[in-house]
Image (cartoon, rainbow, N blue to C red):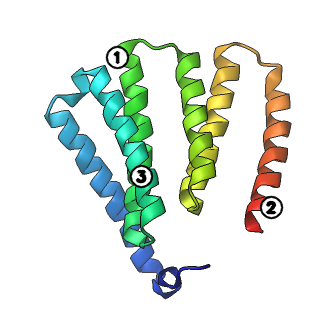
């Protein structure tokens, strides 16, 4: 079932809501910077997980364009905070790439929003590529590109039905 609110909204309203979400995200990150929140790796991990969970919850509960923009912003902020937090706690790069892969894969199956699905696909691809590069298995890049292209073609063709 398609939401009629997306059909009614004009393109400038959608663009303004996306830029508003980006500005709100930057204001939130500036607030965290001013409060010296970036000094604690554990708190950044916890807030990052809360942001990702909140983004998925917002996406599942509400179907308004401004809340979709907010959920996308929280989703990206969550991954950024987890990434910065793992640098402070000195968690290995392979571990964080596997965690990003699993979180993005799980959210891909849960969310129905095309923007969050697209971001999840980008994070899945990026974490797999980062695993290949960090382990210096450069010969696997060819397998990665072909397999990822086939899987994504199947996924998006199936998702349309």
Res. 55 mark:
3
- Residue under pointer 1: 88
Q: Is residue 148 left or right of residue 22?
A: right
The quarter of the displayed image where residue 39 is located: top left
Secondary structure beneath label 3: helix
Q: Are discs 3 and 1 less than 8 Å apart at CB?
A: no
Percent position (x, y) of residue 85? 36, 24
Q: Is residue 150 left or right of residue 76?
A: right
Kindly report the distance in space between the C-alpha atoms of the residues bearing marks 2 and 3.
25 Å
Q: Residue furthest left?
A: 35
At a point 60% along the width and 54% down the height, the residue shown is 117
Disc 2: CA contacts within 10 A as few (<14), some (14-19) or many (>=20): few
Kindly report the distance in space between the C-alpha atoms of the residues bearing marks 1 and 2.
40 Å
> Image quadrant for the C terminus?
bottom right
Kindly report the distance in space between the C-alpha atoms of the residues bearing marks 3 and 1.
24 Å
Q: Is residue 154 left or right of residue 67?
A: right
Q: Nearer the viewer, residue 158 or 31?
A: 158
The quarter of the displayed image where residue 24 is located: bottom left
First-in-chain label (1 vs 2): 1
Percent position (x, y) of residue 147? 84, 38
Secondary structure beneath label 2: helix
At a point 80% along the width and 36% down the height, the residue shown is 145
Disc 3: CA contacts within 10 A as few (<14), some (14-19) or many (>=20): many
Secondary structure beneath label 1: helix
Percent position (x, y) of residue 27? 23, 49
First-in-chain label (2 vs 3): 3
């Amino acid at each position: 079932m398609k939401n009629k609110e997306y059909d009614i909204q004009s393109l400038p309203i959608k663009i303004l809501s996306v830029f508003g979400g980006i500005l709100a995200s930057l204001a939130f990150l500036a607030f965290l910077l001013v409060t010296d929140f970036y000094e604690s790796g554990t708190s950044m991990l916890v807030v990052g997980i809360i942001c990702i969970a909140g983004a998925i919850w917002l996406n599942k509960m509400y179907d308004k364009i401004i809340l979709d923009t907010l959920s996308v912003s929280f989703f990206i902020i969550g991954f950024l905070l987890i990434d910065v937090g793992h640098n402070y706690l000195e968690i290995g790069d392979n571990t964080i790439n596997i965690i990003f892969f699993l979180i993005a894969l799980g959210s891909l199956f849960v969310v129905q929003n095309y923007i969050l699905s697209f971001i999840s696909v980008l994070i899945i691809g990026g974490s797999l590529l980062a695993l290949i590069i960090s382990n210096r298995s450069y010969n696997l890049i060819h397998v990665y590109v072909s397999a990822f292209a086939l899987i994504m073609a199947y996924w998006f063709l199936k998702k349309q039905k």
